[in-house]
Amino acid sequence: MPELPEVETTLQGISPYLRGQSIQKIIVRFSQLRWPIPNNLAAQLEKQTIQTLSRRGKYLLLHFKQGTLILHLGMSGRLSIVTAEIPPKKHDHLDFILQNKKILRFTDPRRFGACLWSENPAEHFLLKHLGVEPLSKKFSGEYLFKKSRARKIPIKTFIMNHKIVTGVGNIYAAESLFAAKIHPETAANKISLLQYQMLTKAIIRILKQAIKKGGTTLKDFLNSEGKPGYFNLKLKVYGRAGLPCFDCKKPLQQNRLGQRSTVFCVNCQKKAT
DNA sequence: CGAACGACCTGCAGGC
DNA sequence: TGCCTGCAGGTCGTTC
């Protein structure tokens, strides 16, 4: 489900309910996520106050006086704000019961998500090596150009590497490359500075637009209020293999690239040589 | 160092 | 209806 826009949508949805609230109780129903939820989480956080919230790439961060709770939604994770009348369902692994009686509920069928605690998040192994934020000033065509000179991997794999730039997943990588008219299999070091500048602009524009629309709902993404996002109405290539390209009307092709399905237009997206 | 790929896990669609 | 296969929004860890 979640790439950067979905995580950002989630952050914006839950923040008003969480900021300044203390945690009354934590219920862990199932702790085996990508990494086990720490045993001492409840002892650590009960009666403590969530001061602020933020996002780093696809990670959601809840900041407390003593440290930071790091949440990742994996492929199928979701956070919602519920009340005690709503009984937990099968994959509702974790509840944070707040002072205001609202509950922050973590749901994740595939359990690729994570919930970890760190007293020094900047040095945490999951966050330490993350690259630039695509919506920050550091993200530019020059940056990608420079980082890519020794890289022969396909450009799509390159921009999905979060040590380079964080938060660009399979949907938005495909959409951005279509917008920039770059073939997803082009070697990263064969792409010109000018093309990287176009690509950077496309990524920024598409991510911002997706956030504005509340993210992309394919099967099951719902925001924290249980409402879907509407960016899927704007998708031009993702999920459209075999259907006509919106620009040239030729059928879109689907290849497998770095173990991920990749849809593109052979006609509009040219490989650099 | 970079590249390729297996691994983690459930749910669902499609073929037989 | 049921069984089997393959695929799904992520990304770490291992191996070469």
Image (cartoon, coloured by chain):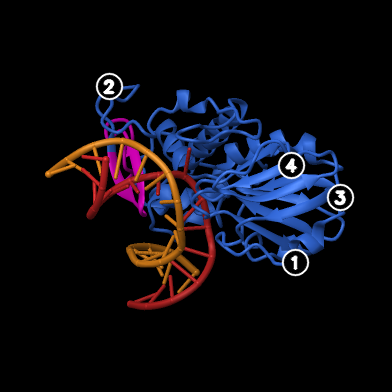
Chain colours: A blue, B orange, C red
Which of these two is toward me, A8 or A174? Answer: A8
Residue placed under numbered mark 1 in the picture: A40
Residue placed under numbered mark 2 in the picture: A249
Label 2: chain letter = A
Which of the 4 image quadrants contains residue A124?
bottom right
For the residues marked 1 and 2, what is the alpha-carbon distance in whole angstroms? 57 Å
Which badge, 3 or 1, is on the more N-terminal residue? 1
**Residue at disc 3, secondary structure:** loop
Mark nearer the viewer, 3 or 2: 3
Mark nearer the viewer, 1 or 2: 1
Crowd tier of the residue under label 2, counting other residues whose Cα lies within 10 Å: few below 14, some 14–19, many 20 or above: few
* Mark 2 residue type: Lys
For the residues marked 3 and 1, what is the alpha-carbon distance in whole angstroms? 17 Å
Mark nearer the viewer, 3 or 4: 4
Q: At 83% across and 54% down in the image, what residue appears?
A: A64
Which badge, 3 or 4, is on the more N-terminal residue? 3
Residue placed under numbered mark 4 in the picture: A103
Tags 1 and 2 touching, CB below 8 Å: no
Which of these two is toward me, A208 or C10? Answer: C10
For the residues marked 1 and 4, what is the alpha-carbon distance in whole angstroms? 19 Å
Q: At 53% across and 54% down in the image, what residue appears?
A: A111
Q: At 32% across and 30% down in the image, what residue appears?
A: A268
For the residues marked 3 and 2, what is the alpha-carbon distance in whole angstroms? 55 Å
Mark nearer the viewer, 3 or 1: 1
Where is residue A131 drawn, in percent x and y?
60, 54
For the residues marked 3 and 4, what is the alpha-carbon distance in whole angstroms? 14 Å
Write the start and end of the magenta stretch as one range.
A254-273
Tags 3 and 4 touching, CB below 8 Å: no
Report whether mark 3 lies on the same chain as mark 1.
yes
Which of the 4 image quadrants contains residue A98?
top right
